[in-house]
Image: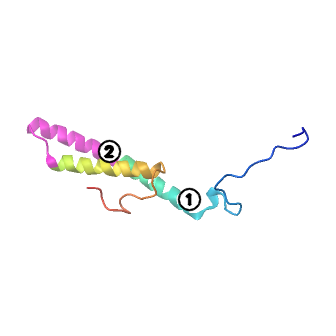
Amino acid sequence: MTEDTPPRTLPEPDARPDAPPPAARPGVWGRGLVMVVFAVLFNLAQTVLLFCAAAQFLWLLIDTKRNDRIADFGDSLGRWLNAVARFQTGATDDRPFPWDRWPT
């Protein structure tokens, strides 16, 4: 290779020359909107989880055993938060509740 010859750029292994850029695909903007909605719901769910933890603590102060309903709800809320985090980070394309069933 001489100094006058520009370097050759190799195509990506899976790239198609006729494929639109990622930002031009219609699904990308829809996913972005859903991600914003889930970000708001995620923050709301964290607040609900905080109140559940405080309620469970107060319950344990009054009664010496845990409240099973609060514990079960906290477990399912944690599973939902996990599903949202996986969707937000692109680990999965499966949309969590309300597009899917509530985790049990």
The answer to whether residue 32 is above or below residue 75 is below
- Please state which of residues 71 and 33 is positioned toward the viewer in this rendering: 71
Q: Amino acid at mark 1?
A: Val
Q: Main secondary structure of the magenta part?
A: helix
SS of the residue under disc 1: helix
x and y percentages locating residue 85 in the rendered image: 41, 48
x and y percentages locating residue 37 in the rendered image: 44, 55
Check disc 1 and report the residue beneath it. Answer: 28
Quarter of the C terminus within the rendering: bottom left
SS of the residue under disc 2: helix
x and y percentages locating residue 54 in the rendered image: 22, 39
Q: Residues within 10 Å of mark 2 (few under 14, many from 20)?
A: few
Q: Is residue 52 magenta?
A: yes
Check disc 2 and report the residue beneath it. Answer: 47
Please report the bounds of the magenta region as a residue range. Answer: 45-68
Q: Residues within 10 Å of mark 1 (few under 14, many from 20)?
A: few
| Dots 2, 1 in contact, CB < 8 A | no
Q: Residue at x 47, y 53 (%)?
A: 36
